[in-house]
Amino acid sequence: MMLIGSLLAAANPLDHVLDVPQIWSSGEHGIWWLTNHMIMLCLAAVLMLIFFPLVTRRYRGGDEVPTGTRNLVEAIMMYIRNDVAKPVMGDEADRFMPFLWTLFFFILFNNLLGLLPLEPITGPIMRALFGEHAHGIYGTATSNIYVTGALGLVSFIVIQVSGIRANGVGNYLKHFLAGAPWYMMPIMVPVEMLGMIVKPVALAIRLMANMTAGHILLAVLAGFTAAAATLGYGALTGIGLAVVLGSVAIMVLELFVALLHAYIFTFLTALFIGQLVVHEHEEHSGEGGEHHEKEEVIGGGDMLDMARLPDKARQTATHVAG
């Protein structure tokens, strides 16, 4: 309940969500050189660099039977590979797995770090070291649109570069027509370009909004307790108990949301990559020159051909992308 206590102490319900500077230049238009969210991003990266070598140490020693934490991590990684990437990327999935695994765990670590009540711990330490105006180190970096926008930009670059490498520049440019006749170019090209831009923007806004919403809801509930304190002990006890129970339920939901949106970001990135790098394959066999078309995951265009997705992937894409 330390997080609830910090929210109660905040004058603004958004104080736990908004980024604050640790090192900045003074003046009306001062620059924030180092902020809480920057520190949390670096902390997530450092934790990953420590955690995964420790988890894989026994693999490097020849022990290939996963147990305990290794079993959990391997199960998550295999799920991302076999049930997230392969259904929409086919045989192309393996070469993108290092990127998709890194993307998933980096977002997940940042989401989980944002749930930790670090301000009551780091605040007194920072103020003791740097004075009363210092801020504690805390916050959800993935609630910052600049952070999620950067993640969306990285995904956008990987998607487009992968499409160019898989198709060549000429075929890549042809996909902007989406199979339409050339005279439809004035209509199709702007629509396809808009769709190409909207995808990473939607990834960024979805992640930011969902990581922000839970903290705001907790702050609003904490505000009920502060308001009840003015009504007397009985009201404070009753409303405070309801707030505590509700907050516990929301924190459990937040854990699920942290995992869910790391999955959604990774799945949609894999889906968008698959739209550009996975194609139909044609087979010719027999003396009569019979033509067989083998339909794999999707067509070659940027627009998703839902009919060619496997049933499981099509259902997942419909629910997640919708």
Image (cartoon, grey):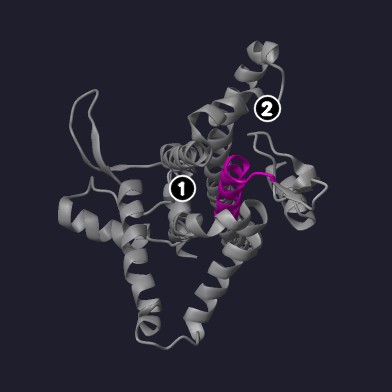
Give x and y (percent) for residue 150: 42, 39
- 91 sits left or right of 285 in the view: left
Is 58 covered by the magenta stretch? no
Question: Can see residue 160?
Answer: yes
Q: Earlier in the sequence, mark 1 or mark 2?
A: 1
Give the crowd class for mark 1: few <14, some 14-19, many >=20 residues within 10 Å.
Answer: many
Mark 2 residue element: loop
Q: Which residue is drawn at 49% across and 42% down?
A: 162
The residue drawn where x is 45% and y is 43% is 151
For marks 1 and 2, give the CA distance: 34 Å
Residue 83 relative to residue 34: left or right: right
Quadrant (top left/top right/bottom left/bottom right) for the C terminus: top right
Task: Give me the disc on residue 142.
Answer: 1
Residue 254, given in percent of the width and then of the height, sits at 58, 58
Residue 230 can be seen, yes or no: no
The type of residue carrying mark 2 is: Ala
Residue located 59% across and 42% down the image? 272
Name the secondary structure under disc 1. Answer: helix
Q: Where is residue 190 in the image (x, y as percent from the top left)?
A: 61, 17
Near-viewer residue (307 or 12): 307
Q: Work out whether residue 146 or residue 289 is closer to the camera in this orientation and state it.
A: 289
Residue 218's spot in the image, x, y percent? Answer: 56, 52
Give residue 240's quadrant in the image: bottom right
Amino acid type, label 1: Thr
Q: Residue 117 carries which label?
A: none
Q: What stretch is highlighted in magenta?
A: 261-281
The secondary structure that most of the magenta stretch takes on is helix
Instruction: Give the number of the mark in front: 1 or 2.
Output: 2
The residue closer to the viewer here, 48 or 272, is 272
Q: Mark 2 highlights which residue? A: 178
Depth order, front residue of 304/5: 304
